[in-house]
Image: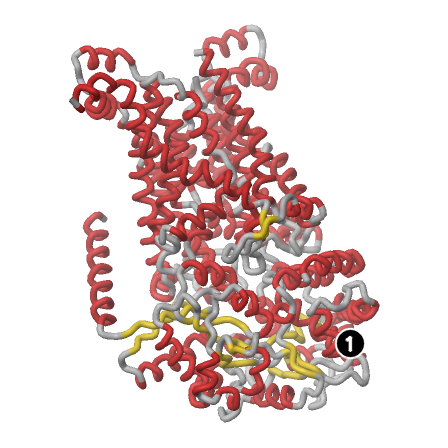
């Protein structure tokens, strides 16, 4: 009996059985927590005792919080400057898109920074910037006579960290473009060349349009990378000096779990703001995918 | 490669089995701590003698790095509590007491007569008439200086009475001429800067005012606070320029190398100075100079503590360890090795000159003993305050903006 | 081909290019080379201010020292304990979810698919408090299991996107033919589709290995002590103990970077195939 029911409905039940384990895990660990966080953001909660309902008070406090605005501003700087990974990655990809001997090895070595943990990248750059003996510090000192401790100067610290973040990000974008360049139709390039197109014109009118899928992925991963900028800030400066290198992702952690924090509700409110910003990009991405799927 | 790895795994497995077997016939007390190397060795010594006296107990110390510990403690207390944990006295332990994460150990105090022997620390260990941990050490803060740097800059060495504030500020100009930092510090972890502020405020406005400020009873925009920062501004230009990028140990290296003359620090730094090659001959210590005449002299002397957690799996043996840690014998051992001061009044203070100087300084401080800025002020205020001090030390011109920001936070925190 | 192949330029240009590439590479990897060099620098060099010159001797002892003086071996082991089950778990789950979403045309298919995709991009911070709480309640806080559980769940999002698109591109006729012969759905998955997914499984495995090995945020949120922390969190805490001992920090960094780098070199083709999925049409 059971056997026949199964036989009759196998095609409609099977997908759910295949989906179940993965879907349940994903819902429990990802989807539900998003809503729980939104819920917690309306409470005052130290993570241990009773929650106290605050309504929108956490958000009202955010609007009057200098540290929040500093983080928000830095997030915008991160987003904008991270986009430099695109032209830089493209440039390196074009530079390397040749077939001399050993090119494969060169390409993988150029890609190296992406494989390394951001913790290690952060430590490397901290050492690079270290006052008195750091290579970068000495370079500036020999050029201007006065060294600059990048990570201790509120004017430069965010840029200093972004440079560290760009290093692996450029490598990532480069590999995307290298793959893209591999698939640029040679006949179109040759045809354009016969028409006298070269250099920038060729790049802009012939090659870039064909690289559009690569560019799209590159934008997506770069935006996500920029908004997830927690590791480097935590390792290199811990948000300092005096909080000037905070970004939202770090500030959230600081408020919710750090030594002086344990304001889970307030942290959740910051996370919700970050989520809202990310949602703009996620919706755009989903919308494009949706369109592509239907066009198939 | 593959063979090697299996070999290593097998080895680990054997090791794990053998420790498990050894531990089986002993009752385990887990202890999370954040010791620097010298104090760690000292505590291991104390644990060894405790285990000798109690052969059926095995104290397993799990050491964290100092800065990381302060973040981790909240995590492990609520999630995976050890039996014992290091922490600090005063307001700094209040959140854990309020959250019910530290166990009431008044019984340990009663049964062992600790109210008598640890009397000096009783107030800072008591909330709601109960005691929440056992203090085992404290240490003075003050100015450590490099005598060689003084000579190099042609500055007269401070006498036994220290120097006056004016002399101190004037000497900074001489150090600057020789490209020696008059005052060094490393504020990357924020708290070292708070030591300087504490002394500025204690010397300008006195203990009572300092306690009111950290207790949230006075506005940060008060003229008296501004007076403190006006004094602070006098030495600000002579502080190591890149302090915000340095850890306190980095700054200690500057003092050792003679690139800096003075360091406002806690006595635990002596071990680091000496490790770097300084000796009793060229390392000097003095109390922070008087700024406002007539203000009774108060000092910073933070107390370090050990607590039984509420989630402890073996609270009985953990209490036994606390009782042992409170004895004159244990406190003498650990403090001599750490180079710090025992709380137990029957313990012997080491004959190290810095310890003796500190002991003398603290026992004659008629103004009062403060814990430390981040222990006297509640967490959120402490964090914001220390960021403010750091900012001031980089950009003194921002002082009004900083104070307004702190005032805003005071309005919210208390 | 773009740009114009270098073989078509003057011999001088070709020479210049062949010199320019390695020079650019050295500049590009300068931070890494600096750290690699420092990791074999004797401590005495640092004390004498020789930070960036050639080391006066090759001090492999630094590597011995980090193993004897710190729990770094334990951190490395923990990293493997978290990473390997995550790779297996996430790949296994997503083979099934990807199969379900690619093969069956049920009604909520698209919604579920986009839920996986969107969930994959959310900022970690919005999950942090509830996930930490959940892990606590399940008694898996501060253990590799708690960390691995979360990673498996979260990575399933990305892996599903990847697997579903990969299976979608397989020839559908194979499955139809099997169905006509009355092969059960599970058998189709196991005997028909799974063997064809080998390249995708390989690509995902190396990618996920690298992602998880390098994770720092969740390691700091879900583990606290040396007996459960993976190498990223461990290295950061060792950095707090090894202040000014850059030779040790460097050796630790190199060690932490080694497994993903080896993985990348051994499985390069798969790695790049996985990473650039969607970069071409």
In the image, what residue occupies the spot 40% across and 39% down? A28
Position of B384 with respect to A185 (left or right) is right
Question: x and y percent of residue C211 in the render?
Answer: 41, 40
Position of B171 with respect to C121 (left or right) is right
Q: How many marks?
A: 1
The residue furthest right is B223
Regarding residue C54, the answer to whether it shows in the image is: yes
The chain ID associated with circle 1 is B
In the image, what residue occupies the spot 34% across and 74% down? B59
Position of C72 with respect to A229 (left or right) is left
Residue C188 position by quadrant: top left
Question: x and y percent of residue A103 in the render?
Answer: 41, 30
Mark 1 neighbour class, 10 Å CA radius: few under 14, some 14 to 19, many 20 or more: some
Q: Is residue B365 above or below residue B241?
A: below
Q: Is residue A251 above or below residue B313?
A: above
Position of C118 with respect to C173 (left or right) is right
Q: Is residue A184 above or below residue B402?
A: above
Q: Depth check: give the residue in front, B67 or B111.
A: B111
Q: Is residue C153 above or below residue B358?
A: above
Q: Depth check: give the residue in front, A276 or C263.
A: A276
In the image, what residue occupies the spot 51% across and 78% down? B131
Which residue is identified by label 1? Answer: B205
Question: x and y percent of residue B202 in the render?
Answer: 73, 77
Q: Depth check: give the residue in front, A204 or C151.
A: C151
In the image, what residue occupies the spot 42% across and 48% down? C134
């Amino acid at each position: 009996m059971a056997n026949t029911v199964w036989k009759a409905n196998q095609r409609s039940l099977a997908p759910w059985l295949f989906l179940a384990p993965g879907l349940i895990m994903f819902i429990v660990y990802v989807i539900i927590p998003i809503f729980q966080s939104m819920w917690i953001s309306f409470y005052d909660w130290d993570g241990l005792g009773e929650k106290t309902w605050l309504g929108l008070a956490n958000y009202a406090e955010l609007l009057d919080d200098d540290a929040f605005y500093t983080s928000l501003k830095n997030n915008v700087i991160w987003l904008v400057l991270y986009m430099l990974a695109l032209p830089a990655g493209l440039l390196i990809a074009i530079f390397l898109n040749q077939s001399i001997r050993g090119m494969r090895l060169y390409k993988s070595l150029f890609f190296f920074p992406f494989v390394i943990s951001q913790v290690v990248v952060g430590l490397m750059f901290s050492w690079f910037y270290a006052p008195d003996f750091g290579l970068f510090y000495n370079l500036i000192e020999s050029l201007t006579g006065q060294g600059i401790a990048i990570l201790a100067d509120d004017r430069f610290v965010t840029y200093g960290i972004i440079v560290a973040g760009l290093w692996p990000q450029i490598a990532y974008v480069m590999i995307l473009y290298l793959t893209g360049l591999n698939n640029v139709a040679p006949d179109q390039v040759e045809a354009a060349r016969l028409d006298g197109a070269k250099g920038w014109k060729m790049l802009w009118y012939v090659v870039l349009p064909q690289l559009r899928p690569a560019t799209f992925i590159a934008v997506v991963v770069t935006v996500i990378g920029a908004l997830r900028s927690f590791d480097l800030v935590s390792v290199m400066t811990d948000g300092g000096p005096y909080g000037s290198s905070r970004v939202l992702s770090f500030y959230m952690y600081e408020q919710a779990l750090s030594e002086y924090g344990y304001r889970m509700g307030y942290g959740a409110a910051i996370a919700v703001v970050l989520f809202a910003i990310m949602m703009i990009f996620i919706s755009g991405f989903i919308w494009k995918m949706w369109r592509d799927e239907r066009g198939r | 490669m593959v063979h090697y790895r299996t070999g290593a795994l097998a080895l680990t497995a054997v090791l794990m089995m053998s420790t498990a077997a050894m531990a089986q016939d002993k009752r385990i007390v887990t202890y999370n701590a954040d010791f620097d190397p010298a104090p760690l060795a000292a505590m291991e010594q104390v644990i060894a003698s405790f285990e000798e006296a109690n052969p059926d107990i095995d104290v397993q110390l799990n050491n964290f790095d100092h800065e990381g510990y302060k973040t981790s403690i909240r995590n492990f207390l609520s999630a995976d509590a050890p039996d014992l944990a290091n922490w600090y006295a005063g307001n700094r332990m209040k959140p854990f007491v309020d959250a019910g994460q530290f166990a009431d150990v008044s019984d340990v105090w009663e049964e062992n007569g600790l109210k008598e022997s640890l009397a000096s620390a009783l107030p800072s260990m008591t909330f709601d008439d109960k005691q929440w941990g056992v203090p085992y050490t404290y240490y003075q803060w003050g100015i450590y200086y490099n005598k060689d740097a003084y000579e190099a800059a042609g500055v007269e060495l401070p006498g036994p009475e220290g120097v006056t504030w004016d002399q101190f500020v004037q000497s900074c100009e001489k150090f600057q001429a020789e490209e020696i930092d008059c005052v060094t510090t490393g504020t990357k972890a924020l708290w070292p800067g708070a030591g300087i502020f504490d002394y500025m405020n204690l010397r300008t406005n006195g203990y009572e005012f300092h306690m009111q400020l950290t207790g949230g009873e006075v506005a940060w925009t008060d003229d008296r606070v501004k007076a403190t920062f006006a004094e602070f501004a006098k030495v600000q230009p002579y502080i190591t320029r890149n302090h915000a990028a340095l850890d306190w140990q980095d700054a200690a290296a500057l003092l050792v190398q003679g690139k800096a003359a003075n360091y406002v620090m806690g006595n635990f730094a002596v071990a680091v100075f000496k490790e770097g090659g300084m000796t009793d001959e060229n390392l000097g210590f003095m109390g922070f100079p008087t700024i406002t005449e007539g203000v009774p002299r108060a000092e910073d002397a933070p107390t370090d503590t050990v607590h039984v957690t509420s989630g402890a799996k073996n609270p009985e043996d953990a209490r036994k360890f606390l009782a042992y840690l409170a004895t004159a014998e244990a406190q003498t051992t650990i403090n001599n090795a750490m180079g710090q001061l025992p709380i137990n009044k029957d313990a012997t203070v080491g004959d190290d000159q810095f310890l003796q100087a500190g002991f003398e300084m603290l026992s004659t401080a008629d103004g009062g003993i403060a814990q430390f800025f981040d222990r006297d002020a509640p967490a959120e205020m402490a964090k914001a305050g220390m960021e403010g001090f750091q900012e001031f030390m980089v950009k003194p011109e921002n002082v009004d903006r900083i104070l307004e920001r702190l005032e805003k936070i005071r309005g919210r925190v208390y | 081909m773009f740009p114009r192949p270098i073989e078509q330029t003057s011999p001088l240009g070709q020479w210049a290019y062949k010199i320019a590439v390695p020079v650019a590479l050295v500049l590009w990897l300068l931070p890494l080379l600096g750290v690699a060099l420092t990791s074999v620098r004797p401590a005495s060099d640092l004390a004498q201010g020789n930070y960036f010159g050639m080391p006066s001797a090759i001090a492999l002892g630094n590597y011995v020292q980090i193993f004897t003086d710190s729990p770094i071996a334990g951190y490395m082991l923990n990293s493997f304990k978290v990473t390997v089950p995550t790779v297996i778990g996430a790949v296994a789950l997503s083979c099934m979810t990807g199969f379900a979403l690619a093969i069956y045309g049920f009604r909520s298919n698209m919604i579920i698919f986009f839920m996986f995709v969107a969930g994959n991009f959310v900022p970690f911070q919005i999950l942090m408090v509830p996930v930490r709480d959940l892990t606590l309640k399940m008694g898996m806080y501060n253990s590799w299991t708690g960390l691995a559980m979360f990673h498996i769940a979260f990575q399933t999002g990305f892996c599903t996107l990847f697997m579903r698109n990969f299976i979608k591109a397989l020839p559908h006729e194979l499955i139809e033919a099997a169905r006509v012969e009355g092969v059960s759905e599970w058998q189709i998955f196991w005997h028909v589709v799974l063997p064809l997914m080998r390249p995708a499984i390989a690509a995902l495995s190396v990618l996920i290995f690298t992602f998880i090995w390098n994770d720092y945020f969740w390691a700091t949120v879900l583990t606290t002590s040396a007996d459960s922390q993976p190498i990223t969190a461990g290295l950061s805490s060792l950095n707090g103990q090894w202040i000014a001992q850059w030779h040790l920090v460097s050796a630790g960094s190199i060690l932490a970077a080694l497994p993903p780098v080896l993985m990348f070199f051994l499985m390069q083709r798969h790695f790049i195939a996985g990473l650039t999925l969607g970069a071409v049409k």
